[in-house]
Image (cartoon, rainbow, N blue to C red):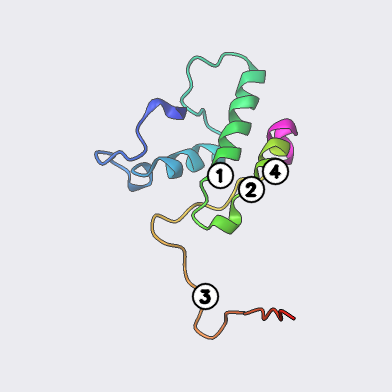
Amino acid sequence: MVGGRRNINAEAEDTSEIYFPHWIYKRLELDEELGLPSIMNAEDKVRARKMVIVSLWCIQTDPSNRPAMKEVRDMLEGSVDCLQIPPKPYLSSPPKSPAGSSTATLVSIQ
């Protein structure tokens, strides 16, 4: 696992380090090391960064933000420079749409 630590660290001094994905986001945003001491060369670092970004897309709280497997494959096969860091996932449920803003589709069966 990236960083060699558990998903939740209740003893963390900084609250941003309590939830593991937030710790990873912080490292990516600051372009810091990902806590993988066994990675020595630049090519491995690029591969690790790519896998981390793709994995963050896959754990999005809102299922509609998660990529399909074909998109995951395309991201892993593509350049790391083309990847965007996804929005940080919520620790709780994502915000709901305001009342009255939902849409419905009627299907007529004849």
- Residue type at mark 3 is Ser
Which residue in the protein does label 1 denote? 58
Residue for point 62% across, 80% down:
104
**Is residue 9 shown left or right of residue 25?**
left
Q: Mark 4 and mark 2 in contact (Cβ < 8 Å)?
A: yes
Which residue in the protein does label 3 denote? 97
- Residue type at mark 1 is Cys
Q: Mark 3 and mark 1 in contact (Cβ < 8 Å)?
A: no
> Considering only order in the chain, which callout, 4 or 1, is on the residue closer to the N terminus?
1
Q: Give the farthest residue toward the bottom.
A: 100
Pick the front one: 83 or 15: 83
Measure the C-alpha gap from mark 3 to mark 2.
22 Å
Q: Residue 80 lies in magenta, yes or no? A: yes
Which residue in the protein does label 4 denote? 71
Measure the C-alpha gap from mark 1 to mark 2.
6 Å
The kind of secondary structure element at disc 3 is loop
Residue for point 50% across, 37% down:
27
Residue for point 48% across, 53% down:
89
Which residue in the protein does label 2 denote? 67
Name the spot of residue 46 as percent of width and height, x first: 65, 26
- Residue type at mark 2 is Pro
Q: Mark 4 and mark 1 in contact (Cβ < 8 Å)?
A: no
Residue for point 47% across, 17% down:
37
Q: Is residue 88 above or below residue 38?
A: below
The kind of secondary structure element at disc 1 is helix
Q: Is residue 93 above or below residue 83?
A: below
Highlighted range, magenta: 76-82
